[in-house]
Image (tube, rainbow, N blue to C red):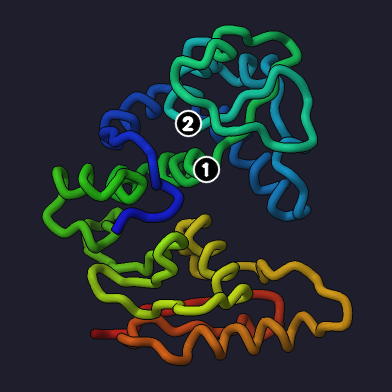
Amino acid sequence: MMPQFLSGRAEFDVREDFELAEALPIDSFKLLLRAALYAQNTRQPIWEFALDLGTLRAAGLTDCDLRWLAMKRYLDHAPEKLSAPLPAIRGGNSSLREFTERSRFVLTPHGRRFVQCLLQRSVADCLVLATRPAVERLLPDSGAVFSSAGCAVPVPCWDGERRELSVGRAVVKRFAVPAENQERVLSAFQEEAWPAHLDDPLPPAPGLDCKRRLHSTIQSLNCNQKVPLVRFHGDGYGRGIRWERLSD
């Protein structure tokens, strides 16, 4: 099963991308990642923190570097300051040849995960960004995320189209009817590549206590699992969610 955020993407060799990116100035990636984290922290569109061409050039990136990052869809590019995101850049788009002093750049969700792996210097972790066929060509166990220590650590995968939560080939939970809050939480975990802790992704709703709603959603996520391989917990403050991998 291909992770939802990679649906429709072309296959590519993550190892080669990682090796090419390692030759680029590390400070430029730190700036881009910091902008993405600021947007997440303030719950603002990432374009509010987009970096201009001059800033990235000063950090050591050339127009050629930026063109490669955009064609690989690690960066999104806008011709000027925006308050809302543009559609993802596709390779061959003529706008990639039109960088100006007003151009703005942000990491795509895919690019953010790639940069986080790059900063950790873990090519093994970056393999999870590849499509499943690409992973199968490079590793024997495509149902696992590989840590920098080389150990297979199975993590969940949420397929929004099939509405299935799985670990490897085991389907943990399948939704036959809409469950908006649960699905929103699972989509957020998938988008962030399953961090240990996730801030409450449910939007405020008039008349509803956010902490109680989150607690109820966590209880629902833990109920009716076909194969109990994942357990969700609150963070103790009512503001976030944690998850743990249960033994087979």
What is the quadrant of residue 76 in the picture? top right
Q: Residue at x 72, y 55 (%)?
A: 41
Q: Which of these two is toward me, 171 or 197?
A: 171
Describe the element under mark 2 as helix, strand or loop: loop
Give the spatial CA distance, label 2 vs label 1: 10 Å
Describe the element under mark 1 as helix, strand or loop: helix
The quadrant the C terminus occupies is: bottom left
Up/down of 85 relative to 209, above or below: above
Q: Which residue is mark 1?
A: 112
Residue 3 in the image: state x and y as whole percent. 38, 55
Up/down of 38 relative to 166, above or below: above
Q: Which of these two is toward me, 221 or 42?
A: 221
Up/down of 8 relative to 142, above or below: above
The reply to whether residue 155 is visible in this rendering is yes
Q: Which residue is mark 2?
A: 73
Q: Residue at x 73, y 10 (%)?
A: 101
Nearest to viewer (mark 2 / mark 1): 2
Up/down of 163 relative to 20, above or below: below
What is the quadrant of residue 183 in the picture? bottom right
Query: Is 37 situated left or right of 61 in this image?
Result: right
Looking at the rendered structure, the kind of residue marked 1 is: Arg
